[in-house]
Amino acid sequence: MIWSRLRPFRLLARPLLRSRRLYHRLLPEQNSGILSLKPITPNDAFVSCTLFNKNGAVSAVSQKFPKWAFLKEHNLYPRDLRKIDTTSVDVIPSIVVKPTCILINLLHIKALIQRDCVFVFDTSNSEAAMKLGVLMYDLESKLSTHSNAHMAQLYEHRALESILMNVMTSLETEYKQHYSICGIILKDLEDEISRDKLRDLLIKSKNLTSYYKKSLLIRDVLDELLDSDEDLAAMYLGEHKSENDDFADLEMLLETYYKQCDEYVQQSETLLQDIRSTEEIVNIILDANRNALMLFELKVTIYTLGFTIATLVPAFYGMNLKNFIEDSPIGFGCVVGFSVITALCVTWSNFKALRSVKRLTMMNNHTGVNTARHAANARHELNQEAPILWKKWASSLRTVWLGSNHPVRNGKHRDLIWKWLVDDNKK
C-alpha cells in the first residue's frame, strides 16, 4: 500500500536524478583534488606546484619539478627560489617582473605567471593550503576563455587580478577578525580594568601590529609597481610594449587593489592608535591609583605615629616607679594633656612635611615658570589631597553634622548668591 502511494513521487524523481548525474559528469575531474589540497613537505630537490593551462583548466595538481631544471627552463636565478620555495618561512611580499614571467609572493600565494600558463606553488602550512584551494577555483573561472567578459584582458593580467583579489579577501577577513576581538576588549576595559583583559589586549595588539606591517608591505609593493613604467611595460608578456606606451588598463587594475590595501592599512593603523590611547589612559589611571594608595599609606602612618607618641608618655607614667606625680591632684590631667598635645604636634609637623612634598609635585609644571593661575590650581589640588589638620577635622565634623550632600560655600559664593537675589528683586 505504501509503495503504491509513493510510486508517483518516484516517477517524478527520476528526471532529477538523471540531471544530477549528468551535472556531476560535466564537472572537471580535478576539482576534487583541488578541494582536498594538503600541505606539502618541503623538499630540497623538487618544487611542487599546480599548473593551469592557457584555457584555465588544471593540467596538473601538486606536480613535482626538479629545482635546477625548473630554474633553467624559466630563465630564473637560484636567488629566486626563496620566493617560490615550499617553506613555512615568511618572506617579504614581492612581485618580480622577469622577461618571460612574473614571480609573485604575497601572503600564502607563491605563483609564477607566464603568457599562457600559471604555476601555483604548494605550501607546507595547512591553513594556507585551504586558502589556496579557494584560489584554484578563482583562477579556473577567471582564466577560462568561455567567458567573453575577459577577452579584452590579457591572460597574465587576469591571473594577476585573481591573485590580488584573493590576497585582498584574506586581508579583509583577517582585519574583521582583529577589529571584532580588539573592539570587545577595548569596550570591556572601559567598564573594568583587569589583568586578564590587559594580557589579552597585549597579545591581540601584537597580532594586529603584525597584520599592519604585512598589509603595509603589500601596499608598498603595489606602489613600486605603479611608479615603475619599466615594470609595467614588462608585465605585458603577450605583447611587446615600451615605457612610452599606454598602460591605462594595468594601472587601473593595480590602483584599484592599491587603494583597497591602503584602506586596510589606514584602518589597522587607526585601531592601533586606539589601543595605544587606551593603554596610556590605563597607565594614567593605574599611576593615579598607586599614588592615592601611597598617600593613604602615608596618612595612616602619620596617624599611627601620633597615637604611638600619645600612648608613650602614659606608658612611662604607668610604670611601677616613684615619680612623685601620683600624689598630685592635677598629675593625671597634666600627663593626658601633655600626651595629646605632643601627639597633635607630631601629627601636624608630619602633615606639614607631606604638604611640602605635595606642593613640590603640584608646582612642577615642567616649564620653569610658576604663574599665578598655576599656583592657584596647585594650591586648590593640594588642599583637596592633603588638607591642613584643623581643616580636615572641620570637614569631618561638617560631614557628620550636615551630611555629605550639603553644599560648601565660601564668602565669594555667598556674595554672588546675595547679589543674584537682590538683582532679582529689583526686576
Image: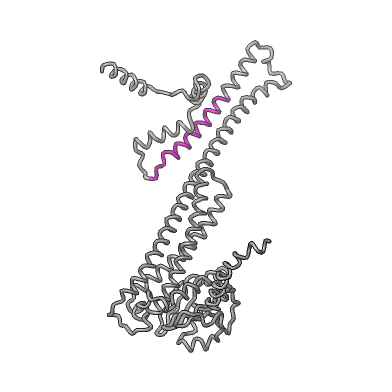
Residue 176 position within the rendered picture, expressed as x and y whole percent measured from the top left:
48, 58
The picture quadrant where one finds residue 216 is bottom left
Quadrant where the C terminus sits is: top left
Quadrant where the N terminus sits is: bottom right
Residue in the picture at 52% in, 60% down: 207
Q: Is residue 354 above or below residue 281?
A: above
Q: Main secondary structure of the magenta part?
A: helix
Q: Residue furthest top?
A: 329
Q: Is residue 320 left or right of residue 27?
A: right
Asked whether residue 86 is in view, the answer is no
Q: Which residue occupies the foreground of this view, 166 or 243?
A: 166
Residue in the picture at 42% in, 61% down: 264
Asked whether residue 190 is in view, the answer is yes
Q: Is residue 284 left or right of residue 302?
A: left
Q: How is the image coloured?
A: one colour
Residue 143 position within the rendered picture, expressed as x and y whole percent measured from the top left:
44, 77
Q: Which residue occupies the foreground of this view, 277 or 382?
A: 277
Residue 362 position within the rendered picture, expressed as x and y whole percent measured from the top left:
43, 38
Residue in the picture at 57% in, 32% down: 302
Q: Is residue 199 magenta?
A: no
Q: Is residue 358 magenta?
A: yes
The picture quadrant where one finds residue 113 is bottom left
Residue 306 position within the rendered picture, expressed as x and y whole percent measured from the top left:
59, 28
Span shown in magenta: 343-366
